[in-house]
Image (cartoon, helix red, strand yellow):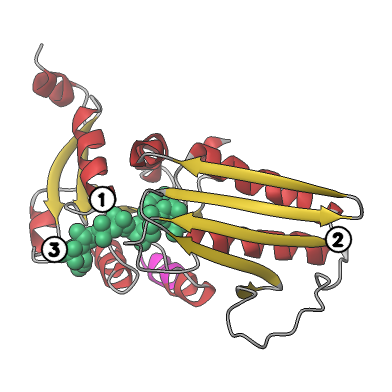
Amino acid sequence: MTEQQEKGATEAIRVGVLGAHGRMGTEVCKAVDAAPDLELVASADQSDWLGDVSAAGAEVVVDFTTPDVVMDNLHWCVDQGIHAVVGTTGFTEQRLERVRGWLADKPGVGVVIAPNFGLGAVLMMQFATRAARYFESVEIVEQHHPRKLDAPSGTATHTARLIAAARAEAGLGPVPDATSDEVAGARGADIGGVRVHAVRATGLVAHQEVLFGATGETLTIRHDSYDRVSFMPGVLLAVRAVRARPGLTLGLDALLD
Ligand SMILES: NC(=O)C1=CN([C@@H]2O[C@H](COP(=O)(O)OP(=O)(O)OC[C@H]3O[C@@H](n4cnc5c(N)ncnc54)[C@H](OP(=O)(O)O)[C@@H]3O)[C@@H](O)[C@H]2O)C=CC1
Ligand SMILES: O=C(O)C1=N[C@H](C(=O)O)C[C@H](O)C1
C-alpha cells in the first residue's frame, strides 16, 4: 500500500498550514507530510487567500505567522468551523478573552494555543512554577535568533506569569532589588514583578534560563531548542487532539497529561 493509500484508508486528518514558508511553517509542512495519519491539504503564506484553505477541506489549521495577523487568521478559522493549533506569539489576556468569545458562538470548534510546543520547554515551565514559591529572587533570561520579531518571547512572558501567580499564592512579596532604573532597560522588562531579559544573537535558536535565588544558593532551570524539529512532536500532538477538545486549550500541558 502506498503512503497516499494508507492515509486514505485511515481517514487522515486534513491539515492546512498558515505561515507555511516561514521557519516554523516549513518544518510543520514537512512533519505533517511525513505523518501517516495526517494529510497536508493547504499551505498558505502572506500572499495567499485563506479561502483556498477552506476550499481544500482543511479540518485543522496550524498557524505560525506573526502576532499582528494571527488574530484575524484565528477569527476566520473559528468562523469557518475549522479547528486551530496556534504557535504564534502575542496572546495577551485580552486576546484570549476575544478568542473565548468567538468560540462561545461555535461550540464544536477547538483551539489550542501554546507559547511553546517543545516538550523540554513545557517541563522547564512546570519545574520553574514548582520552584517559584521557595525562592525570594527570580529572573528570566530568554535567548533567540536575531530575526525574531517580538520580545520578550511568548515562552518567557508565559513563564513570568506562571511564576508571578505561584509567588502570589505562596504569599511572597516583591523580588528584592535596590538597583536604580537610571539606564532604561538595564533591568529588563517587568512582567508581573518578574524581570525578563531578552538576548538576540546569530547562532541561537530558542533558549531560556530561569534563575532563582535564596540566601546562600541559586537554582538555574534551563532549556535549549537547537533545532525547530524539537517543536514538531508537540505540534502534531495538538493537531491530533484538537478536534476532540472543543473550546480553548492553553498550553501543551493539558494534552501531555
Ligand atoms: N509555540 C512555539 O512552540 C513556537 C512559536 N514560534 C512563534 O511562531 C511565530 C512564527 O515564527 P517563525 O516561523 O520563526 O517566523 P517567520 O517569520 O519565519 O514565519 C512567519 C511566516 O508567516 C507569514 N505570514 C505573514 N503574514 C501572514 C498571513 N496573513 N497569512 C499567512 N502567512 C503569513 C510570513 O510571510 P512573510 O515572510 O512574507 O511576511 C512568514 O512566512 C512567531 O510568533 C514565533 O514566536 C516559533 C517557534 C516555536
Ligand atoms: O520565535 C521563536 O523562534 C520562538 N518563539 C516562541 C516564543 O516566543 O516563546 C517559542 C520559542 O521560544 C521559539
Task: Specify whether tag 1 is near ligand 1 (CB below 8 Å).
Answer: yes
Q: Which mark is residue 50?
A: 3
Q: Residue at x 26, y 34 (%)?
A: 31
Q: Residue furthest top?
A: 1
Q: Residue at x 81, y 55 (%)?
A: 213
The overriding secondary structure of the stretch rendered in magenta is helix
Q: Quadrant of the C terminus?
A: top right
Q: Specify start and end residues of the magenta stretch as a single range.
A: 99-108
Labels 2 & 1 near each other (Cβ < 8 A): no
Give the residue pinned by disc 2.
170
Type of the residue with mark 1: Arg
Q: Nearer the viewer, residue 196 or 202?
A: 202
In the rendered view, would you say 181 is above or below 231?
Answer: below
Does residue 114 appear anywhere in the picture? no
Q: Quadrant of ligand 1?
A: bottom left
Q: Secondary structure at mark 2?
A: helix
Dot placed on the residue nearer the N-terminal end, 1 or 3: 1
Type of the residue with mark 3: Leu
Measured in 3D between alpha carbons, the distance from the residue under mark 2 to the one under mark 1, in whole angstroms, is 40 Å
Q: Nearer the viewer, residue 170 or 83?
A: 170
Give neighbour class at mark 2: few <14, some 14-19, many 20+ (Cα, 10 Å). few
For residue 106: magenta?
A: yes
Closer to the eye: label 2 or 3: 2
Type of the residue with mark 2: Ala
For residue 134: magenta?
A: no
Give the residue pinned by disc 1.
23
Labels 2 & 3 near each other (Cβ < 8 A): no
254 lies left or right of 10: right
